[in-house]
Amino acid sequence: IKDTVLVVGTEKAVWTGAVNNDWHNAGNWNTLKVPNAKTHVIIPLTQNECVISSEDISVASIQVRAGAVLRVVNNRKTVVTGKCAVLPIE
């Protein structure tokens, strides 16, 4: 019997900060979609730090890489819904 890894209904999104620092701007993500509860998020060091300010968020996981910043302001909530034994890599 071989081990099999199966990922169902999840995707990975990497912050690029290509447009500005707004988490809710799809242009700031490599997927060109704002992450949701089924998304594993990776925040690498970029010129524009990632800021959650206009709405609450819900994601499967968040990895903030060394030197990177994820800022939550305006009393926004960040809900991490996934129980990940192994986090995805870039």
Image (cartoon, rainbow, N blue to C red):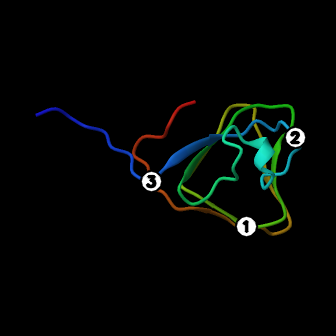
List x then y, in percent, for residue 62. 60, 48
Q: Earlier in the sequence, mark 1 or mark 3?
A: 3
List x then y, in percent, for residue 72. 79, 57
Q: Earlier in the sequence, mark 1 or mark 2?
A: 2
Residue type (three-letter) at the residue carrying disc 3 = Gly
Give the residue pinned by disc 1: 56
Give the residue pinned by disc 3: 9
Q: Secondary structure at mark 2?
A: loop
Residue at x-position 58% and y-position 30%: 90
List x then y, in percent, for residue 47. 86, 31
Q: Secondary structure at mark 1?
A: loop
Examine the image and state in which quarter residue 64 appears.
top right
Give the residue pinned by disc 2: 19
List x then y, in percent, for residue 11. 53, 46
Residue type (three-letter) at the residue carrying disc 1 = Asp
- How far apart marks 2 and 3 lie (CA) works out to 27 Å
Q: Are marks 1 and 2 in contact (CB under 8 Å)?
A: no
> In this rendering, is residue 37 above or below 49?
below
Q: Are marks 2 and 3 in contact (CB under 8 Å)?
A: no
Residue type (three-letter) at the residue carrying disc 2 = Val
> In this rendering, is residue 45 above or below 84?
above
> In this rendering, is residue 17 above or below 56?
above
**CA neighbours of label 3 inside 10 A, class few (<14), some (14 to 19), many (20+):** few
- How far apart marks 1 and 3 lie (CA) works out to 21 Å
Q: Secondary structure at mark 3?
A: loop
